[in-house]
Image (cartoon, grey):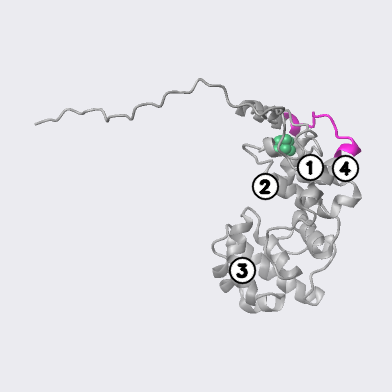
Amino acid sequence: MVRKATAAKRPAKKPVSKKPPKKVPGKKPARAAVKPVKARANADAAALGGKLKPWTTAEVTEAFRRFQKVSPEPKGELEHVNAFTLLCAVVMSAQATDAGVNRATRPLFATVDTPEKMVALGEDRLREAIKTIGLFRMKAKNVIGLSERLIAEYGGEVPASREALEALPGVGRKTANVVLNMAYGMPTMAVDTHVFRVGNRTGLAPGKNPLEVELGLEKAIPAEFMLHAHHWLILHGRYVCKAQRPLCETCIINDLCRWPGKTVLDGNMAVNR
Ligand code: SF4
């Protein structure tokens, strides 16, 4: 016998309250007008083309003063124990997340923390240790190659020079900038995907490629903020000014940002300035 399908019984709908939301005397509630996806995409295209109004020096100073107030000593998220392991971690982080790199390098760097130990470990065992990271074969080859060069040419030390770093296997301008900044305290600006997006989207330093954004940021940011500017912008891009849906509602530079696609707040902003 074929049984008739019966519709599942739905729970009764709750009656919708027609009452207006409670008003807090003297306080206008914040409302966020989020732009549609297409408008945000168009805004990103306009920002990339450098069509936004440039920032004044006073505005740039104000933005970084706010970043500094919220996070006076920002830190990178790649784990390392010295300049050599920092260099290796940055080389391994290309097209991978910091968390994924850390999972593989944490046990590795606990025992292998010098170029000599890395060469002694060998490419096969290094490949095995970092096999969870994308492009691990090429990265293992580069890390062994750069370790050999550091021993042969720099007595096992990591050189504090852009030219010397960029001549090492697997090391490009961005990696050199990270190492010079974090290991040697130089005011360099490493432009990764997050910094590239923030530089363009905000209108702070529009550019068609990472080098243009890097030079634009170096020109725009006052010297007093340059040491930490790279980390402030990376963290801002990673956690607030995200690619798909930036959290403009809680952004501490919302009022300064030039992005035409930003979420406009009507009312009080709950931000820490
Ligand atoms: S307001 Fe903030 S989060 Fe939104 S686009 Fe501008 S910088 Fe990014």
Of helix, strand and loop, which one carries label 2?
helix
Q: Quadrant of residue 54?
A: top right
User: CA–CA distance between discs 4 and 3?
Assistant: 37 Å
Of helix, strand and loop, which one carries label 3?
helix
Residue lying at the far top of the rendered structure = 18
Task: Please name whichever residue, 7 or 162, is drawn nearer the observer in this view of the structure.
Answer: 7
Mark with earlier residue (3, 2) = 3
| Label annotation for residue 61 | 4
Mark with earlier residue (4, 2) = 4
Q: Amino acid at mark 1?
A: Arg
Q: Amino acid at mark 3?
A: Arg
10 Å crowding of disc 3: few (<14), some (14-19), many (20+): some
- The number of numbered badges drawn on the structure is 4
Q: Mark 3 touching mark 1, by CB under 8 A?
A: no
Q: Amino acid at mark 2?
A: Arg
Q: Quadrant of residue 23?
A: top right
Image quadrant occupied by the N terminus: top left
Name the residue at 85% across, 42% down. 216
User: CA–CA distance between discs 4 and 2?
Assistant: 21 Å
